[in-house]
Amino acid sequence: MTLDGQPVPRGQIVLQPVGRGPLAFAQVDEHGTYSVQTAGSKGLIPGKYQITVIAFKKEPWDGITRAELDEIRLIPVRYSSPETSGLQVDVEKGANHCDLNLKTA
């Protein structure tokens, strides 16, 4: 996963199926790479997914203000909601690869 061409060094990705099915999750590592898991198993069930991403410089803490939260964001807030992220993927049976190339503008 990149932001403006640079790897995002941490974050969480949620893949929500369009229609029915379990959510899938991934942790982003320091190189911007990730592997998706669904219900504790590696991979995704075939289908269409909406993607959301959150990434912070450090973990938010209890009592954090909105301004403080915005200061520690690594990516724009629009990527944190399926309604505004604009990120989708169609997963087919077999091996799939999905690069998330995020933009600040």
Image (cartoon, rainbow, N blue to C red):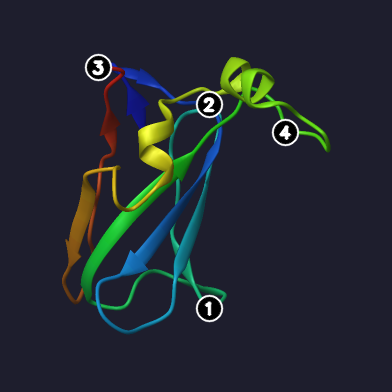
64 in relation to 25, above or below = above
Type of the residue with mark 2? Pro
Which residue is tagged 1?
39
Which residue is tagged 2?
9
Outermost residue on the bottom side: it is 20
In the rendered image, residue 59, in percent from the top left (x then y), is placed at: 72, 33
Mark closer to the chain start, 4 or 1: 1
Mark closer to the chain start, 1 or 3: 1
SS class of the residue under badge 4? loop
Which residue is tagged 4?
59
Type of the residue with mark 3? Ala
Q: CA distance from mark 3 to mark 4?
A: 24 Å
SS class of the residue under badge 3? loop
71 in relation to 86, above or below = above
Q: CA distance from mark 4 to mark 1?
A: 24 Å
Contact between labelled residues 4 and 3, with CB atoms less than 8 Å apart: no
Q: CA distance from mark 2 to mark 3?
A: 19 Å
Q: CA distance from mark 4 to mark 2?
A: 13 Å
Mark closer to the chain start, 3 or 4: 4
In the rendered image, residue 2, in percent from the top left (x then y), is placed at: 34, 26
Type of the residue with mark 1? Ala
Residue drawn at (48%, 28%) of the image: 31
Pointer 2 local density, CA inside 10 Å: few below 14, some 14–19, many at least 20: some
Return the residue nearer the eye: 13 or 68: 68
